[in-house]
Image (tube, helix red, strand yellow):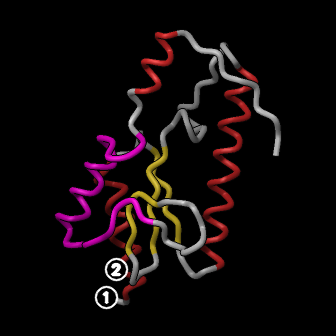
Amino acid sequence: MGFMVALETTPKVRARMSKQRSRDTDVEMALRRTLHAAGLRYRVHRRPLKGVRREADVVFGPARVAVFVDGCFWHGCPEHATWPRNNAAFWREKIQKNRTRDNDTDARLAEAGWVSVRVWEHENATEAAERIVALVRKRRGA
């Protein structure tokens, strides 16, 4: 594992970062509302695989579908990723590790018969939900 340098931040940066939500974000809540309105029931913030410390935002257990709502900054969105100038090396390494972990999670789930769905925070919740609904129904055989 690579050595990460200590992140030196200003009080202003620390305050802003501490307000970043990791769960129940606006886009996640909109997605969940749309999925629920479509008649799907699910679990939230669960680990799809026992023994693997990775939590999905929305889990459809019987269909084996795990949904992850990824933030554009934290997961390096190809459309909206921004690269901070301050502590640039730290942030590049942090975001790259997030991407590597996401790929590993998807591979582990696939090996266990699950399907991972990645939704970017900038995506339209209704369009993302339509994609998920179709996949879940197909996997349920409905």
Instruction: Give the quadrant of residue 18.
Output: top left
Rendered-image quadrant of the C terminus: bottom left
Query: Which x, y percent locates residue 136?
Result: 38, 76
Residue reaching furthest to the right: 2
The count of marks equals 2
Residue reaching furthest to the bottom: 141
Residue indicated by mark 2: 137
Is 110 magenta? The answer is no
Query: Which x, y percent locates residue 22?
Result: 42, 42
State the residue at coordinates (38%, 27%): 19
Is 25 magenta? The answer is yes
Query: Which x, y percent locates residue 92?
Result: 71, 30
Query: Which x, y percent locates residue 111?
Result: 66, 78
Q: Is residue 65 above or below residue 8?
A: below
Q: Which mark is residue 142?
A: 1
Q: Which mark is residue 70?
A: none
Mark 1 in CB contact with mark 2 (< 8 angstroms): yes
Of 140 and 104, nearer the camera is 104
Lower sequence index among marks 1 and 2 = 2
Q: Is residue 96 above or below residue 125?
A: above
Q: Which residues are magenta?
A: 22-46
Q: Secondary structure at mark 1?
A: loop
Q: CA distance from mark 1 to mark 2?
A: 5 Å
Of 69 and 15, nearer the camera is 15
State the residue at coordinates (68%, 61%): 104
Q: Secondary structure at mark 2?
A: helix
Q: Is residue 120 above or below residue 74?
A: below
Q: Amino acid at mark 1?
A: Ala
- Left/right placement of residue 96 relative to residue 77 reads right
State the residue at coordinates (25%, 72%): 40
> Dot 2: few (<14), some (14–19), or many (≥20) neighbours within 10 Å?
few
